[in-house]
Image: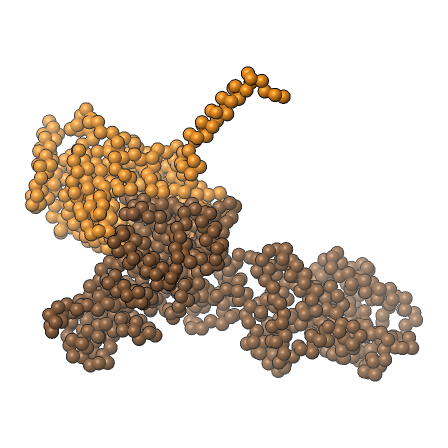
Chain colours: A brown, B orange
C-alpha cells in the first residue's frame, strides 16, 4: 500500500508535468508501442513476456500506475526465462528496440531531471542508458530487455547486456555518441572536458539559451556521469580511481559547473540563479572568485581546523546562506575591526560588485594607524604582494608594508618611529628607524626589511654599542613571564611589554640585556606620522597618497559627482577610488558627535559601484572595517561625509580620488 | 487659431514671469527646506562653541590656535602643534567647558590620546585635565569623564578645588569592538552609570557604587551588535536602545525613561518609543523644553539607502515630531541648549534662535546674556584660583573679578 501511494505521488510529480510539456518523442513512441502491443496481443510469439497491457502515455494515469505497480513482467523469475540474444542474432536483426515494459519502468523510476537530458533526442536517451543514469531496476544489472525483429520478420524478446545493446544502437544511429564514448576513459576524460565550453551567462536570456544548448547536447549525459562519480564514488575500483583522478585534474570551476548543470537539468531558474545571483558565496563555490573573503571566516567557523577542504568551504557557505548573522562577528576577536560587521547577505552583495584584490587578512583595530591600514590595502591591490597573516602578526604587517614603501622612496625622514641612543664616541644621539611589532616578532622574508623590525633594531644597537655578540637576537615577552632569577633570563636580550598597556602596535617596551635595564639608554622616539592627503603645500610630497602614487606610478583624478563615478569605474576594471571622510558621518550608528565640527577623518577605499532604483551605491572598505567585510553606502551618504571633512580641512581639499 | 495682440500680451508676461521665477529658484542641489542655516560672525567650519545668544564664540584660528571672542574682544585660549584641531563640550549649566585638542590630520587611531583641558564658561584660562577622548561634563559641570580606547579605561575627575584628590577610573571589557565608546551618566560622585559591551557583542549598563565598592550589570541589552545611549533629563535617565541595521532579525529601536531619583532598577523603565526599524539614534536630551531628539530611520521597505531625519520625542505625550527634511541626517548636537544639525559642512537650526550675527547690546546687560562664569559661586572660586596661579593677569581678568563682586552684591540684595 505504501509502495502504491509512494509511486502514485512520484508518478504524479513525474508524469503530470511531462505529460503537459516535455516528452514529445517518448510520448509518441510509448503511444505507438502501446498500440503495437495491443495489436499484436493475439498474434504474439514474443515468448512468455506478457506484453498485452503496457499502457501508452495516452492511457489514463491510473491505468499506468496500476500497471506499473502490478508489473511482474520484469521480475527475476520472468527474467530467468528470457532467452539471451547473441551477437550474431543482433548483428542480423533488422530492428532492435527496448521492451515497452522496460521503457515504462525507466520512465517511472528515473529522476525527472535525468530524463530532461533525454527529451530533446533519442541519442541522449541511449547515452543516459550507457552511462547508467537511467534506472532500469532490473534484477540482472547491466542488462536490458529488447524486442528484436529479424530479417525474416520474426519477432523475439530477449535480454542482452547494456553494453552490447548500446554498441549496436551506435552502429545503427547516434554515431556521435560513439565518438564521445571512445574518449570517456580515465586517461582521456580531463582532456575531453577541457574541450567543452562552459559558458557563463550574464543575462537571463543568455542563460536560457545556454541551458537549452546543454539539454540538447550529446555531451550532457557524459557530464552527468562525471557528476555522479564525483558526488557518490562507487566501491568499484575502476570508478573509485576515476573519481580520484577527476577530483584532482578538473578545476573547481569545472566541477561546480557540471554539478550545477546536472543537479538542475529540470530547473533552469536554479541553474541560472547560481550565476546570475548576487550571492558572492556561490561565485566562490563556482570557482569564479577567490576564497580569501571566505577563508578566515570559515577557519573560525570550522573551529579546531588548520586547513580547510572544499567541503568545509561548502559547509560554511551553506551556513552563511541560511544564517546571515554569522558574519556579524566571525573573526571579530582574532582580527579586531569595527563591530558589528555587515551580515552575510550584505557582504555578499558588496563583494559581488567589488574589485579590490586582496587575499590577506588585516586587523585595523590593533594596527593603530588608519592611514597605514588603508595604504597597505592599496599597495596590496596594485602590487599583488602577499604576506602570510595571522592573529599574531596582522597588526604589524601593514606597518612593514608601508615601511618598505618609505624606504624604497627614500623618504625615511618622514618616518617618526626611531630608537635612539647616545653614542659616546661621536658624542651625539644616533637614531635608527624601525617598524613596531607589538606583542610578537614579525617574520619577514626580506632580510633588509627584517633588519628594521623593532626587535632587530634593538639588537643592532646593543651589538654596535655595548659589545654584544654578533648573533644577538631580542625576544619580545610579556613582563609577567620575565623571571630574572631563572637561568634562561640571565643572558640575552628581552623586550618586555605590559599587557595592560599594549594594544596592537602601540606597545611601549622595557629593554633588558644580560639582566641590565637599558630602557633609559635606548629610547623610543615615536611621533605622529605623515598625513593621508596633504594638509599644506610645504611637505605634501610626504602625504601617504602622494607617496603611493610616486612609488607605483599611479595617476589620481578627483571624483566629484555620479558622472565621474560612472566614468572611472567603467574606464578600467582595475580602477578604484580612495578618499577620506568623517567617521561620524560615514557610520552614524557607531559614532556620535558631541561638539561642533567634530570629525575623526577615516580613509576608505571605494572599489565597486552599482545602481538600484535610481540610487548609486558604492562598496566601501573603511580603515576601521575588516578588509573582507565591505559596506554599501549610497553616494549621497558618502558625499555628506566627504563634504564634512572638506569643510574643516586646512586647504578645503575635496578628498575623493580615482586612482589608476 | 492665431493669438491676437490682446491675448498675446498676457501670455508674454506669463512667460517672462515664469522665466524670472525659474532663475530665482535655487538649483536642484541647494537645500530649500524648512530649517534655517546657522549664521554667525565666524565661518561655521571654524567654530568650536557658540553660545545660544551668540555672545560667546570659541573658534579655531589657523594654524593651530583656539580663540575666544566675547564682549568685543578676542583672546587666545590655547595653541598647539601645526595640525592641532580643537573641539569643545559644555552643558546648559554654563559653568565649565572641556577642550579637546587632537592631532587631526595625521590619522593615528581614531581614538587617540588627545589632550584635554578645562576652562570656565566663557573664559580663556585653561587647566589640563588629562589625555583621552569623548569628554563629558557631569553634576553641574563639577566632574568630567573621558575615555581611553587604548587602555579601555573610563576616567573620572573632579573639577572642583582640591580636584587632584578626586579622581577614579573604571576599566571596560569592550574586546569585540576596538572602537567602542561608552555612554556615561553620573548620578552622583558615588553612583555612576556607564555602558560596556561583552564578547558576545551585547551591550549593557553597569552601575558603579563607589561607596559600596560594587560594580554590577544593571541592564543587559536585547540585541547583539546593538548600542545603548544614555542622557539625563532632570531626574529622568533616558535610555535609548538601538539595534544594528546589519544584524538581521533584531528588535528595532526603543527609548525608555527611568526616574533615577527613586530607583535604579531598570526593569521599571517606562517605554516612550518603539520601532521595528534600526534607527541611527544619537539621542540628545534638551532639558529646557524637555524634549528628546534623535535620528530616526525614515527608509521605506528594505532599501539599501538609509534615509534618516531628526525627530523630537515628547516624554509626556510620547509624540514623535519630524523636525528635519534633509533626507540624510546623521547627527544632532545640543550646543548650549540650541539643537543643531551638522549637515555637509553646514549647521541647520532645529531648535533655538538664529541671532548670532546681532551685535546690539541688551537693555539689562548685567543679567541678560551675560553668560560668563560669574554667576555661580563655585565657578568664581575656581576663576580666582586660576587667576592667582596664572602669571599673566590681564585687564580683562580684573574686569571679570570686579563684575563677580558686583553680581554677588546684587544677589545678596
Picture quadrant of residue A200: bottom right
Q: Position of residue A61 (x, y in %)?
A: 78, 59
Residue shown at the point (16%, 79%) measured from the top left: A467
Q: Residue at x 27, y 51 (%)?
A: A536
Residue B1 on image: x %, y %: 63, 21
Residue appearing at x 35%, y 52% in the figure: A580
Q: Residue at x 40, y 69 (%)?
A: A386
Q: Residue A340: name its quadrant.
A: bottom left
* Residue A573 or residue A257, whichever sits in front: A573
Q: Can the viewer see residue A483?
A: no
Asked if A577 appears above or below A161 in the picture, the reply is: above
Query: Which residue is at the front of the view, A108 or A276?
Result: A276
In what quadrant of the picture does the C terminus of chain A appear? bottom left
Q: Check the image and report above or below for B407 versus A171.
A: above
Task: Report the front residue among B263 and A507.
Answer: A507
In this rendering, would A456 be left or right of A212? left
**Residue A507 image position (x, y, % from top left):** 25, 65
Compared across the picture, whether B314 is left or right of A50 comes to left
Task: Classify the position of the N terminus of chain A by image quarter.
Answer: bottom right
Amino acid at each position: 500500500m505504501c509502495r502504491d501511494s509512494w509511486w502514485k505521488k512520484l508518478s504524479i510529480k513525474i508524469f503530470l508535468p511531462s505529460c503537459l510539456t516535455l516528452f514529445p518523442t517518448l510520448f509518441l513512441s510509448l503511444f505507438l508501442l502501446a498500440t503495437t502491443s495491443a495489436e499484436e496481443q493475439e498474434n504474439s510469439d514474443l515468448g512468455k513476456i506478457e506484453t498485452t497491457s503496457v499502457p501508452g502515455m495516452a492511457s489514463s494515469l491510473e491505468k499506468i500506475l496500476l500497471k506499473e505497480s502490478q508489473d511482474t513482467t520484469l521480475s527475476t523469475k520472468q527474467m530467468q526465462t528470457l532467452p539471451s540474444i547473441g551477437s550474431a542474432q543482433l548483428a542480423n536483426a533488422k530492428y532492435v528496440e527496448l521492451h515497452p515494459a522496460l521503457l515504462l519502468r525507466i520512465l517511472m523510476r528515473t529522476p525527472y531531471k535525468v530524463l530532461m537530458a533525454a527529451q530533446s533526442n533519442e541519442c541522449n536517451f541511449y547515452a543516459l542508458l550507457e552511462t547508467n543514469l537511467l534506472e532500469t531496476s532490473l534484477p540482472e544489472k547491466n542488462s536490458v530487455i529488447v524486442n528484436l525483429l529479424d530479417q525474416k520478420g520474426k519477432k523475439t524478446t530477449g535480454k542482452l547486456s547494456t553494453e552490447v545493446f548500446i554498441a549496436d544502437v551506435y552502429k545503427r544511429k547516434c554515431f556521435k555518441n560513439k565518438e564521445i564514448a571512445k574518449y570517456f576513459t580515465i586517461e582521456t576524460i580531463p582532456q575531453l572536458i577541457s574541450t567543452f565550453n562552459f559558458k557563463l551567462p550574464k543575462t537571463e536570456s543568455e542563460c536560457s539559451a545556454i541551458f537549452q544548448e546543454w539539454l540538447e547536447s550529446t555531451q550532457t549525459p557524459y557530464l552527468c556521469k562525471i557528476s555522479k562519480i564525483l558526488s557518490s564514488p562507487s566501491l568499484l575500483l575502476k570508478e573509485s580511481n576515476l573519481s580520484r583522478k577527476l577530483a584532482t585534474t578538473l578545476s573547481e570551476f569545472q566541477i561546480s559547473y557540471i554539478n550545477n548543470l546536472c543537479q538542475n537539468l529540470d530547473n533552469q531558474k536554479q541553474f541560472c540563479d547560481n550565476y546570475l545571483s548576487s550571492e558572492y558565496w556561490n561565485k566562490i563555490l563556482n570557482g569564479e572568485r577567490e576564497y580569501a573573503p571566505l577563508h578566515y571566516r570559515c577557519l573560525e567557523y570550522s573551529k579546531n581546523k588548520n586547513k580547510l577542504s572544499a567541503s568545509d568551504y561548502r559547509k560554511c557557505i551553506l551556513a552563511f546562506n541560511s544564517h546571515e548573522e554569522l558574519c556579524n562577528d566571525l573573526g571579530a576577536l582574532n582580527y579586531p575591526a569595527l563591530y558589528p560587521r555587515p551580515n552575510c547577505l550584505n557582504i555578499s552583495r558588496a563583494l559581488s560588485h567589488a574589485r579590490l584584490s586582496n587575499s590577506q587578512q588585516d586587523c585595523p583595530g590593533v594596527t593603530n594607524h588608519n592611514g597605514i591600514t588603508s595604504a597597505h590595502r592599496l599597495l596590496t591591490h596594485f602590487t599583488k604582494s602577499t604576506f602570510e597573516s595571522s592573529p599574531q602578526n596582522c597588526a604589524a604587517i601593514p606597518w612593514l608594508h608601508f615601511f618598505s614603501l618609505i624606504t624604497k622612496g627614500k623618504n625615511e625622514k618622514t618616518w617618526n618611529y626611531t630608537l635612539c641612543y647616545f653614542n659616546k664616541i661621536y658624542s651625539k644621539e644616533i637614531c635608527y628607524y624601525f617598524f613596531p611589532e607589538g606583542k610578537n616578532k614579525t617574520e619577514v622574508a626580506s632580510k633588509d626589511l627584517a633588519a628594521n623590525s623593532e626587535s632587530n633594531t634593538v639588537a643592532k644597537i646593543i651589538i654596535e654599542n655595548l659589545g654584544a655578540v654578533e648573533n644577538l637576537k631580542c625576544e619580545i615577552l610579556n613582563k609577567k613571564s620575565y623571571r630574572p632569577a631563572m637561568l634562561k633570563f640571565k643572558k640575552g636580550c628581552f623586550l618586555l611589554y605590559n599587557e595592560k598597556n599594549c594594544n596592537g602596535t602601540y606597545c611601549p617596551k622595557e629593554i633588558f640585556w644580560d639582566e641590565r635595564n637599558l630602557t633609559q639608554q635606548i629610547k623610543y622616539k615615536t611621533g605622529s606620522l605623515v598625513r593621508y592627503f596633504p594638509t599644506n603645500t610645504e611637505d605634501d610630497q610626504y602625504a601617504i597618497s602622494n607617496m603611493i602614487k610616486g612609488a607605483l606610478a599611479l595617476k589620481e583624478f578627483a571624483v566629484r559627482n555620479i558622472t565621474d563615478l560612472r566614468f572611472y569605474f567603467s574606464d578600467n576594471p582595475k580602477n578604484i577610488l580612495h578618499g577620506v571622510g568623517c567617521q561620524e558621518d560615514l557610520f552614524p550608528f557607531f559614532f556620535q558627535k558631541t561638539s561642533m565640527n567634530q570629525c575623526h577623518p577615516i580613509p576608505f577605499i571605494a572599489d565597486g559601484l552599482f545602481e538600484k532604483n535610481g540610487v548609486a551605491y558604492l562598496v566601501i572598505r573603511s580603515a576601521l572595517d575588516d578588509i573582507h567585510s565591505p559596506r554599501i553606502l549610497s553616494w549621497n551618504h558618502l558625499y555628506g561625509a566627504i563634504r564634512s571633512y572638506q569643510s574643516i580641512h586646512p586647504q578645503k581639499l575635496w578628498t575623493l580620488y580615482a586612482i589608476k | 487659431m492665431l493669438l491676437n495682440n490682446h491675448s498675446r500680451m498676457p501670455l508674454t508676461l506669463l512667460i517672462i514671469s515664469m522665466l524670472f521665477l525659474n532663475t530665482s529658484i535655487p538649483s536642484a542641489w541647494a537645500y530649500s527646506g524648512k530649517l534655517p542655516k546657522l549664521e554667525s560672525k565666524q565661518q561655521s567650519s571654524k567654530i568650536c562653541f557658540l553660545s545660544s545668544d551668540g555672545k560667546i564664540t570659541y573658534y579655531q584660528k589657523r594654524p593651530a590656535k583656539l580663540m575666544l571672542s566675547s564682549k568685543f574682544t578676542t583672546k587666545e585660549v590655547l595653541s598647539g602643534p601645526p595640525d592641532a584641531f580643537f573641539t569643545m563640550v559644555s552643558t546648559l549649566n554654563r559653568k565649565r567647558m572641556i577642550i579637546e585638542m587632537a592631532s587631526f590630520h595625521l590619522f593615528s587611531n581614531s581614538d587617540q590620546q588627545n589632550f584635554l583641558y578645562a576652562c570656565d564658561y566663557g573664559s580663556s584660562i585653561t587647566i589640563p585635565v588629562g589625555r583621552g577622548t569623548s569628554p563629558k561634563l557631569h553634576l553641574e559641570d563639577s566632574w568630567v569623564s573621558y575615555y581611553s580606547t587604548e587602555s579601555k579605561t573610563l576616567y573620572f575627575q573632579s573639577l572642583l578645588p582640591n580636584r587632584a584628590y578626586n579622581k577614579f577610573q573604571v576599566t571596560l571589557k569592550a574586546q569585540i569592538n576596538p572602537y567602542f565608546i561608552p555612554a556615561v551618566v553620573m548620578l552622583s560622585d558615588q553612583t555612576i552609570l556607564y555602558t560596556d559591551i561583552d564578547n558576545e557583542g551585547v551591550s549593557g549598563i553597569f552601575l558603579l557604587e563607589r561607596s559600596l565598592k560594587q560594580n554590577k550589570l544593571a541592564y543587559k541589552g536585547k540585541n547583539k551588535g546593538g548600542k545603548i545611549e544614555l542622557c539625563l533629563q532632570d531626574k529622568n535617565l533616558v535610555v535609548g536602545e538601538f539595534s544594528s541595521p546589519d544584524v538581521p532579525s533584531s528588535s528595532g529601536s526603543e527609548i525608555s525613561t527611568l526616574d533615577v531619583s527613586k530607583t535604579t532598577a531598570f526593569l521599571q523603565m517606562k517605554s516612550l518609543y518603539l520601532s521595528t526599524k534600526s534607527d541611527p539614534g544619537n539621542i540628545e536630551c534638551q532639558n529646557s523644553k524637555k524634549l528628546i531628539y534623535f535620528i530616526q530611520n525614515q527608509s521605506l521597505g528594505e532599501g539599501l539607502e538609509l534615509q534618516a531625519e531628526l525627530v523630537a520625542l515628547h516624554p509626556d505625550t510620547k509624540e514623535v515630531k519630524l523636525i528635519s527634511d534633509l533626507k540624510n541626517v546623521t547627527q544632532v548636537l545640543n550646543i548650549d541648549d540650541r539643537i543643531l544639525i551638522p549637515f555637509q559642512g553646514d549647521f541647520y537650526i532645529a531648535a533655538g534662535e538664529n541671532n548670532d550675527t546681532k551685535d546690539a547690546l541688551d537693555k539689562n546687560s548685567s543679567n541678560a546674556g551675560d553668560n560668563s562664569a560669574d554667576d555661580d559661586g563655585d565657578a568664581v572660586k575656581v576663576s580666582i584660583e586660576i587667576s592667582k596661579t596664572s602669571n599673566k593677569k590681564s585687564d580683562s581678568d580684573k574686569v571679570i573679578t570686579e563684575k563677580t563682586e558686583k553680581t554677588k552684591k546684587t544677589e545678596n540684595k
